[in-house]
Amino acid sequence: MSAPGSPPALLLLALAVCLPRSAACLPRRNVLLLLVDDLRPALGCYGDALAVTPSADALAAQSALFTAAFAQQALCAPSRTSLLTSRRPQTLRLFDTGSYWRRAAGNFTSLPQMFRERGYHTAAMGKVFHPGVVSNHSDDQPYSWSEPPYHPPAQQFKNWPVCLDADGELHADLFCPVDPRTQPLHTLPDIQTAERAVSWLKQRAALGASTEPWLLAVGLHKPHIPLKMPFEYLNLYPPESVPAPSHPHRPPGLPEVAWNPWMDLRRRHDVAQLNISFPYGPMPEFFAGSVRQGYYAAVSYADDMLGRVLAALADSGQAASTVVLLAGDHGWALGERGEWAKYSTSEDATRTPLLLHLPGETGSLEGFRHVSPLKAGGRRRQRRRSSAAVVVRSPVELLDVMPTLTEAALNVTLARCPAEGSQPQLCTEGRSLLPLVRSIHRHGQTPAPRGPHELYRLINGTSAGDLELQLLTNRVPNAPLGSLTRQSPTTKPCSGLVVSPSRRAAFSQYPRPSVLPRPDSDQPQLRDIRVMGYSVRTRHLRYTEWVAYDPVALRPHWDDLFARELYDHRGDPLEVENVADEPACRHIVRAMSRLLRSQGVKV
């Protein structure tokens, strides 16, 4: 019997002998999967004029850019496991960090495992699977990887007290710019990960084209907290250039159960010293500005590391045969609606960048050159943003990554998982994104967003009319995405909308231990979950139901409804005005509820 993850003999024979024009005979591409922890769309290519991200922007210029990509749960472990197995958290029975899907839900084939079983050499560097119980303390070995996964040694010092505070002492702070030379091992984790990936790509190139194809997954830790990055990246974002969000307060219509009290921030030494009231006390603006500055600096630092890896791919001569996918594992709120971090079903928590490079279709990375943000930063406001090769406006899910890469690199179409009953080891609850990309590419290219107003238009499909004119008139110059303000469009909420089950939609969920905020509301353990928020995002709307949940039977009780949310993104991109109880929206609530219950969750 072959070991888990090793290529079966019959499969090797099938790879050696194939029929002309069959999928098995088509050239197989390498895959470079780039995952960035806690990354919201704070990238220049997404219209964020504050962000200094030359490498992501250059990748976008040769890629398909998805303006509305959403995580299935805004927590690292469930989101990454969902992405890497193409199953929803509900299917995986994973909402926290306390279980391994192969034991808790089913021995489902992972993305790297599928490639390995088809003759690929698979490797992981940095944070790909979430560490610990959720990946069997082994990054899912022996199933997923052809070689031991690499974890940067400096990551063991993640929470060490190395941050110089105002008192002149070193603490474990949230805001933590450092000199890498003074750190343990004289470096930082993402620097080590990038260096290892660069070396690995050089080694694969030296082996020659006759070797097996490969899948390399590279996971960067930043901008995940603590916001520990080389201090020079802060210089890209002078404090006066980083605006506050336009709506920094908890909206009156936000249900208490939906509120994320951002306990992971409160536990940091520098935040604890602020003595912020629980659960709704606002973060003082002087410190909130530092957090926003630190987040953007950490994004530029991550972009610098991505640039090193992409340049190594180009220099190795393998770019022409390599599919590249860049994604975050979920978003991160920067004080919008008074919330920080993730841990909710909101737009800021669930929305993340997604870029897909298909060599020969969306462009070429053979000429990619690494430009450090530290050198590009001074030109950011004079330089026009590069356009993406293809812009996809439809809502998509991180579930779609696995079927997309298997089709793009293996020429294999994954079967859809059955809606009911036991699930096979290999199937997908997502859908390949290639039909969307190729359809748009055939019908003409769409320019990438070059500002907040254009991104709003791309997401919601509005190309003309009073709404666009208002956004153009009222937008804040050079403002990041979070600074979009609540507009007053001529159309009323819910008017003129039709919910179509046949259109693409993105589904997310998040658990709560109670209907009122508690210290464990952000990360309840499975046994303590009593409420589940299920959310669906369409082109124009986000609808969420918070219902009772049985952690033993692992089932929602749809009839036991605690709260609901409905936001019309045509005029409310920040999700400030909950219109779920508006009489004019009753027909939308009914339709969205049916959509949520029928497609987003197995019951």
Image (cartoon, rainbow, N blue to C red):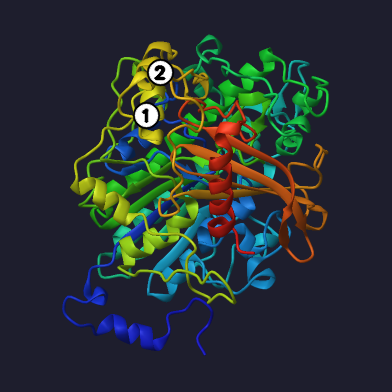
Q: Which element carries disc 2, helix, strand or loop?
A: helix
Q: From this viewpoint, which residue is outermost toward the bottom?
A: 1
Q: Is residue 427 above or below residue 548?
A: below
Question: How far is the residue under mark 2 from the one under mark 1?
Answer: 9 Å
Q: According to the image, label 2 marks what residue? A: 471
Whether residue 311 is visible to the viewer of this picture, yes or no, is yes
Under mark 1, the amino acid is Arg
Where residue 449 sits: x, y (%)? Answer: 34, 29
Whether residue 151 is visible to the viewer of this picture, yes or no, is no
Decide which of tag 2 and tag 1 comes sooner along the chain: 1
Compared with 144, 557 (above or below) is above
User: In the image, is residue 530 above or below residue 222?
Assistant: below
The quadrant of the picture occupied by the C terminus is: bottom right
Left or right: residue 113 compared with residue 466 = right
- Residue drawn at 75 percent across, 55 percent down: 549
- Callout 1: SS: helix
Quadrant for residue 374, please give it. top left
Residue drawn 80% across the image and 22% down it:
276
Q: Are marks 2 and 1 in contact (CB under 8 Å)?
A: yes
Circle 2: residue type? Leu
Q: Quick one: 165 or 562, which is closer to the camera?
A: 562
User: In the rendered image, which quarter is residue 16 located in?
Assistant: bottom left
- Residue 485: % across, % down: 51, 18
Category of crowding for the residue at label 1, using alpha-carbon neighbours closer than 10 angstroms: few (below 14), some (14–19), many (at least 20): some
Q: Nearer the viewer, residue 415 or 239?
A: 415
Q: Position of residue 454 (x, y in %)?
A: 35, 26
- Residue 297 lies, in percent from the top left, at 52, 26
Residue bearing mark 1: 457
Q: Residue furthest top?
A: 240
| Depth check, front residue: 442 or 95 | 442
